[in-house]
Amino acid sequence: MENEYLKTKKILIVEDDVSSRLYLNKILEKTGATLINAVDGKEAIEAVKSNPGIDIILMDIQLPVIDGYGAAKKIRELRNDIIIIAQTAYSLLGDRERIIASGFDDYIVKPIFPHQLIEKLTSSRRKL
Ligand SMILES: [Mg+2]
């Protein structure tokens, strides 16, 4: 379903698993948002460098080349205004602290359900 807030947004999806990436794209393309994809942390950093209009990043934590923590830290050095949301397989408290310390604004725990993802992307704001 088209989403008034998200349809004007450019969202970078960072996910190394092909089926998860397709799943996230399928959910988010319905909102009307502009979608960009990256398959590892290094590609995510490069995507931010070459796309100044990115508003929101949905980033997996476990990624090849550079993981989600490292990519978020680097992206924060480049852009302080992008909302970065982690997608994590873990619900451990220690993970939450590390996620926030790495520059993420929020996180969502896998498995990700469509309504939950839309709600998270719509309500998350940049923590300054
Ligand atoms: Mg992964």
Image (cartoon, rainbow, N blue to C red):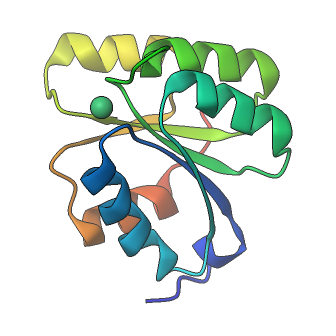
- The structure residue drawn at horizontal position 44% and vertical position 22%, both measured from the top left corner, is 68
- The structure residue drawn at horizontal position 81% and vertical position 46%, both measured from the top left corner, is 51
Above or below, 2 relative to 104: below
Q: Is residue 81 visible?
A: no
Asked which quadrant contains residue 115, the reply is bottom left
Residue 79 on image: x %, y % = 78, 28
Above or below, 91 relative to 11: above
Quadrant position of the C terminus in the picture? top right
Left or right for 4, reference 64: right
Q: Is residue 108 visible?
A: yes
Which residue extends farthest bottom?
1
Left or right for 123, reference 115: right
- The structure residue drawn at horizontal position 76% and vertical position 28%, both measured from the top left corner, is 80
Residue 118 on image: x %, y % = 39, 67
Residue 22 on image: x %, y % = 35, 62
Asked which quadrant contains residue 116, the reply is bottom left
Left or right for 58, reference 16: right
Residue 69 on image: x %, y % = 45, 15
Above or below, 34 relative to 85: below
Q: Quadrant for ligand 1?
A: top left
Choose between 125 and 6: the one closer to the eye. 6
Q: For the image shown, how many numbered marks are present on the structure?
A: 0
